[in-house]
Image (cartoon, rainbow, N blue to C red):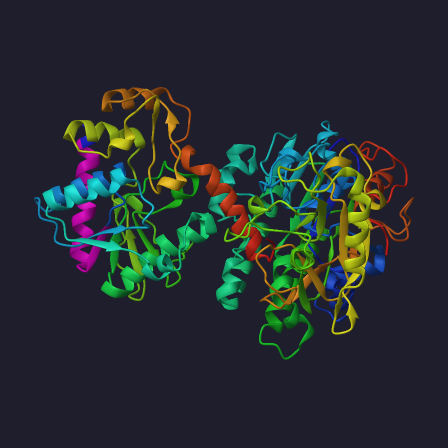
Amino acid sequence: MNGRARNIIIGLDGVPYELLKDLSDSGVMPNVGALIQKGTFRKMSSSIPEVSSVAWSSIITGANPAEHGIFGFTDIPPNTYRLSFPNFDNLKVTPFWEKDNNSKHVLLNIPATYPARKVNGVLISGFVALDLEKAVYPEDLIPNLAEIDYKIDVDSEKAHRSLELFIKDLNRTNEARIAAYRHLWVKEWDTFMLVFTGTDRLMHFLWDAYEDEGHKHNADFKNFFKRIDESIGEILSRVDDSDNVIILSDHGFEKLEMDVYVNTVLIKGGMLKLKEGAASNYSNIDHGTKAFALDPARIYINLKDKYPRGSVDPKDKKSVIHDIIRRFENLLFEGTKVIRNIYKKEEVYRGRFMDMAPDIVLVGNKGFNLKASLASGEIFSKGVFTGKHSQHNAFILINKKELINIPEYPSVSDVIGIINSLNGGGQWKANSTTENVPAGTARP
Amino acid sequence: MNYLDKLENQSIFIIREAYAQFRNVAMLWSIGKDSTTLLWLVRKAFFGKIPFPVVHLDTSYKFNEIYEFRERYAKEWGLNLIVGRNEEALSLKMGPEKGKFECCTMLKTDALKKVIEKYKFKALYLAIRRDEHGIRAKERIFSPRDEDFEWDYKNQPPELWDQYKTKTRTEEHIRVHPLLGWREIDIWEYIKREKLPIVSLYYSKRGLRYRSIGCACCCNPVKSNADTVDKIINELKTSRISERSGRAQDKESAYIMQKLRSLGYM
């Protein structure tokens, strides 16, 4: 441990600033509440788009998506319409632990770190990890994890059939995560990073249970956060004041009022054409398509020379973008504007991989959940989900008050810099190539 | 005792034990090498006349060679064959192009649920092996499933000193895995010794052979010149390619898609 202060980073996937504050104030999360009193608690902006793989990639690298190369859970490589699933191998810059090989790191359940690779310490990948055997470094930990019934993620499929089964599995997965952290805590380390991802899953399906005291799963919702708080309390009891404890989320959450299908807007506007009679997937994008969207609301211009049935001449790109922006600016649901922000890529991204970036990214207004499914016939509909991600209200909570250099409203790509300043040095140099760029995290 | 004899004896013991315990049982036969080996052992256990049905889950997308093999040996071995098909899903044109994971769920899992519901089987014999796939390493020989087919592997009775736990709560069905301890190479050594007929897809043609078979649309052959059982055994002794590699890629994407869909993406 070289006598240095240790860094303990606890991620609470998707937990919004306001919810953490509320559950602390109301006594569900007393340990977090005490830490808020004692330390520094800020609202933080997420990546654009506000999905976990993008945001956590920014958190662990300090880079914006055009630098780290992760723009979403899905991608379509140029010259194809083949959907691909970027993973840890596609991350273009190194995460903090690979820049600091002299320290020992324990990294448990960070999203977008699959497949696991060598580290000076331990890495157990988070969502989307397929196979535990490829999710664990070093391999000899696999039997220990099997022993505690470690599971990478709750089976969210269950929630579509039975919320009771889902809650049972969620708690079981969370207990195994806690058992894994305890098992790993006793190892030698300088940095311990643990992400609880069950919070995000719970809020997707049961945000309504949080807002409604009379909801039959209201207690289940609170109990889950109570259990997280107990674990945080346990961790805090195991550290001393010189250690840095950073608790943070990657994006926020809010009530889902309506799903909004971005590709359906494009289809109805005649800008996206799928082959007649074929399945609704990207490989059936037809000639005449001007643009298509990937989840949640990343719009790509279907340029000639870039895609197999590219239909937009580069010289017309500007006017197509203009046309799309106008459509989404004017998109209304029962008189309410659906889209809050429309970003052209130059406004939010900067880096070596601008070519991979979507041409336009939309961020929805409160309650509007933007989706890219090609298969929805309707622009607006409502599914089983009651909560949705939000871009503006992630949080960061640090056990120190006198901080050097924390912005009033930081973004996820500032986290590495903040930890560096806590450590009084720069051993975790951020990957950002430019100063003060919006870093994929323009502030609304 | 020769180790193949040991494996054979142990499997036959499990097969008889499960039948004595549950009576209303059936065996799943995918017509691949493992379940055909299991079928052979079941025939041996009951002296050629199997006292329960053999179920083939037919997605309608299997290789022709599989259907030919099924017809020929169902007849030759006098099997009481149940073909499980999800006709409802097939009439709605369910197929791999609608999503491989959905296709598997509808045409295999749901087809099996329908069969179990119809015949009220208490136990099913399956030919899974521990060395096939990471997660299967945790399987037990007698493995309970709940009403949602969920395998609660935390709540498994221990099987210490080979004391198989065949007793269980009545509302579930039990999966019986007589081949759990066999390795891929044991299967082939046994096929060789018993001169077992096996679907021709396993033997190399034009430099390619299948190491694992299922639906024609979702299996890829591996590079191989092994066109006899001996050559296959030889190949397995040196190969570092995993058995299910020919089936993995699409499944991985399908799995990710399913995970993402369950969270509202895609």
Q: Residue at x 75, y 42 (%)?
A: A58
Q: Which image quarter is the C terminus of chain A in?
A: bottom right
Q: Nearer the viewer, residue A125 or B69?
A: B69
Q: Residue at x 84, y 42 (%)?
A: A346
Instruction: Give the magenta-colored segment's residue range.
Output: B5-27
Residue B156 appears in the picture as rendered = no
Corner quadrant of residue A4: top right
Q: Does residue A346 show up?
A: yes
Locate residue A241, reporting x and y percent.
81, 47
Report the side of A38 relative to A251 (left or right).
Answer: right
Q: Is residue A355 above or below residue B85?
A: above
The reply to whether the magenta stretch includes residue B20 is yes
Is residue B224 or residue B216 the one in the foreground? B216
Q: Position of residue A381 (x, y in %)?
A: 63, 67
Q: Is residue A166 above or below residue A286?
A: below
Is A236 above or below relative to A335?
Answer: above
Q: Main secondary structure of the magenta part?
A: helix
